[in-house]
Amino acid sequence: MGRSIRWRLIIIYLLLILVAMELTGVYLIQALEKYYISSYTTTVVSQAQLVAGFLERYMAGDPDRSRISQLVQEFGRQSRFDIVVLGPNGTLIGSSGDNPKELERALNKSEISRALSGGRGQTVGIAPATGDSALHLVEPIRLGERIAGLVYVIASLEGTYRTLADIRTILVYSALLALGVTAVLGLIVSQTITGPIEEITAKARRMAAGDFQQTIEVRSDDEIGQLAAMFNHLTNRLRDTLSEISGEKSKLEVMLTNMADGVVAVDGCGAIMAMNPAAGRMLGMDPGGSIGKPLSGPLADSADRFKVADRTLVARYAPIKGGGPDGAGGERAGTVIVLQDVTEAERLDRLRREFVANVSHELRTPLTSVKSYVETLADGAVEDPALTRQFLTTVSKETDRMNRLVRDLLELASLDQNDTLWDRRPIALGDAVIEAVTLIRPQTDRKGISLQVDLPDNLPLVMADSDRMQQVALNILANAVEFTPSGGQVTVSACARAGGVHVVIRDSGIGIPREDLPRIFERFYRVDKARSRELGGTGLGLSIAREIVLAHGGDIAIRSRVGEGTEVEFWVPVSGGTCGGGVPE
């Protein structure tokens, strides 16, 4: 109610009437009080002068106290005043009361002194009989130039104050009546003003809720009527404008939603105003739940290039201008940030460059070796059967190495393009590992390496391509055998946990330095490049193994210490399982 214009108008009317009545009442009461006191004082003065005139004859010589008392008492009964007659020296001569001593104690000495000096004493004091306010008036009794005595009149003012109190009561009731009438009239008048405003407010509330089919009946040509007409015009314009905005917004939303680039809009305070799904995926944020939250991280520092998790993002910033009808020439109202994920482009570029460099490097050595041996044979070494056989053996070995390199490259290309034909079916992963162990055992026997296998018979089946799983185990075992010296040991074990089958291959070989572990699965990456080439490795075995495991929804991990050996663990989900997202602990 306190917020309603209607009640504010009524309260204003009431306050105006109240202030007016208050000011009028105060002025009227003060004027009436002055008038009544003045009129009453005149009456008391007349009575005092009348008594003084009667007493002149009795004060000429020796005062006749009994006669004076009789006259004073008669005047006191008629006027209902307390009257005291004093001598020229201020002594009590006569009194209208039954207790002269009490009246004498109530006399005002300063007013008596003033009257003895020839003036009239007048003050407001206390009536001795009732204790009420009373007018104390002292009139001198003159005999020529001499003051023969004094007439002291004490007149109660209670009647005057009672009359004034009655007038105040009448004024209060009049003010209350006026306030009541004003409240009723104010309610009626305010209704004519607030009624149309309430109607407009109700219509506006419906419009805010989305109903733009609202119109107001124009009932007059005054300001309220003009407001109603303007509201109707505004409704029509707003309906047309929102229709246009809705169409443009739909087009913009479709564009932003289907954009490959991320778009983030922030206000001048750095709070997120909008974010499309692509930006949410790039930044790892919920587009809907991020609205209103402050921008943080590299974007808050206006970084042009940064990484989020394993993504490399490039950001472009465009200011949103405000302060003008066209949004130009004003202060910066916000920023639009366009994000591009260049991770894949950089990866492909890096892979292309590494591929060219690595393939060139890997092919150059065997080609150079083959060319030199062939040239030697052509220069006459072919006449030496033993030397020819040695050269041809080397040429065959280098050719086999190039063959393996090309085969591995073709297999990786097939995995990258997702055009590998998989023969997935429920298999016993231990059987595929056993086949790989069987193929690698001649090499372990030749090098004098102990090969131990611990594969339980009750492992659950996994959904996988048996030949590919055999290839994974064989690639890992080949690395373990190659980098384990004679007299070393290679162990193969497996277990089932966390919804998959884990295969662990450990060796007691030379180990891998800590700084090389993060890159061990990269293509063509070798820890000991010279030795790897001597042993015929292509640097692609672990890369192929990783791609195959990931394609089966599993994962692979490696742990190693220099001089203590290496442990490779790969995990494949059981038949009917889901992708892992990391080797489960």
Image (spheres, rainbow, N blue to C red):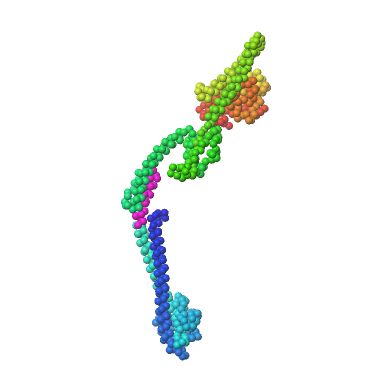
Name which residue lies at 34% across and 57% down: 188
Name which residue lies at 31% across and 51% down: 219
Q: Nearer the viewer, residue 480 or 459?
A: 480
Q: Nearer the viewer, residue 93 or 344?
A: 344
Q: Is residue 193 magenta?
A: yes
Image position of 509 (left or right of 120): right
Q: Over which residues does the magenta segment extend?
A: 189-211
Q: Is residue 154 in sight in this rendering?
A: yes
Residue 493 horizontal/vertical position (percent): 60, 25
Query: Taking 198 as reference, is 335 above or below it?
Result: above
Overall secondary structure of the magenta section? helix
Q: Quadrant of residue 67?
A: bottom left
Residue 73 horizontal/vertical position (percent): 42, 84
Q: Quadrant of residue 324?
A: top left
Residue 306 horizontal/vertical position (percent): 55, 35
Name which residue lies at 42% across and 36% down: 251
Residue sitting at the far top: 383
Residue sitting at the far front: 329
